[in-house]
Amino acid sequence: MAPYTDAHRLFLQALISHRILKEEYAIQLYRNCCNLTGEEVDDERFLDFIATLNDSVGQFDMEIRKMHDETTGEPNWALVNTNGDEIAQLATEYTASEIAYFKRLIDLIVRADDDAFSVTSIVALREASKLKTPITKSAAEALLDKFVDDRWLIKARNGRYSMDIRCLLELQGYLRGEYEDEILECTLCLDILTKGQRCDVQNCSARLHHHCARNYFGPHRGEETVCMTCKTTWYAKNVVGDDGQASVAGGGVSRRRGRAVLKKEKDDENVMDVEGGLDEEQEEELIRRPRKKVDKGKGKAPARMVVDNDE
Ligand SMILES: [Zn+2]
Ligand SMILES: [Zn+2]
């Protein structure tokens, strides 16, 4: 495994503030960090670069993980807690009653009938008034918007809320622990599945994300597609999760509002030291603007990428 360098430190600093990056931006960030610190850029060593980082952040119960966005199918990389107390991290960004509301929403989403894995805005707002410390309708509306902005939830065009990728990535341990019987897994990638397709056969457990179904059945286009588990015809008509499709907001590069969570965690090598480094503008720049040299890289990312500025 390659040694930990300044490029790793820069990459980690940017990932801590963005928390989740689409893979193309993560690779661009890797290239820019290497260029800035004069290290060799080789896209084929990106995974090795991540492995070195994971070796370092592991001591803080953190991991850099890859997951596909269930809606777009795009791969994303994120820094996640692995200490089993994922909900606690919300305390840096939300009050206790806001977290209580969020947990109620997750409960409604996970326990929704017919594997809908979503909740209507009417039900979501009604739930706010039932809390021990009730939240007013207007405050709940603002809070729901914030959950969407922060990529915990996604709002479909039909108005239903479901879990966004940050929720599935960062709260994976909580969801699997708390909802062992309700949470579904994709038969192909084994990640949590809340949007996808299921086998027609009632007692067959096969479920696939839409993007995993495309990957799996893609090479067999034109032939009859059959379930990978029970071998009956796969019609892709039985949908898991909300079918409201495209989201109303979100999907860009998210920036965490609360940055306090990691500041207290330092070690002698300053592996997690996020202070005294780049300011926010410089971090944005790292992802936004590839250096000249990068254009010759082997990657497929466009030479200049425009990143949504969500603040
Ligand atoms: Zn999958
Ligand atoms: Zn089947």
Image: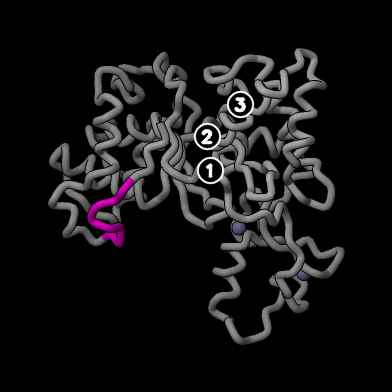
**Is residue 18 shown above or below 88?**
below
Kind of residue indicated by mark 1 = Ala
Label 2 and label 1: CA atoms lie apart by 7 Å
Q: What element carries label 3?
A: helix
The quadrant where ligand 1 appears is: bottom right
Residue 101 on the magenta span: no
Mark 2 close to ligand 1, CB under 8 Å: no
Mark 3 or 2: the one toward you: 3
Q: Which residue is rendered at x = 71% and y = 70% of the image?
A: 236
Q: Where is residue 252 in the image (x, y as percent from the top left)?
A: 44, 44
Label 3 and label 2: CA atoms lie apart by 10 Å
- The disc, 2 or 1, on the residue closer to the chain's N-terminal end is 2
Q: Is mark 2 on a helix, strand or loop?
A: helix
Q: What stretch is highlighted in magenta?
A: 299-306
- For residue 288, which quarter of the picture? top left
Q: Where is residue 282 in the image (x, y as percent from the top left)?
A: 24, 31
Q: Position of residue 139 (x, y in %)?
A: 65, 21
**Is residue 238 shown above or below 160?**
below
Mark seen at residue 249: 1
Q: Are marks 2 and 1 in contact (CB under 8 Å)?
A: yes
Q: The C terminus appears in which quarter of the rendering?
A: top left
Q: Which residue lies furthest to the bottom in this view?
A: 223
Q: Which residue lies furthest to the front in this view?
A: 138
**Is residue 192 shown above or below 230?**
above
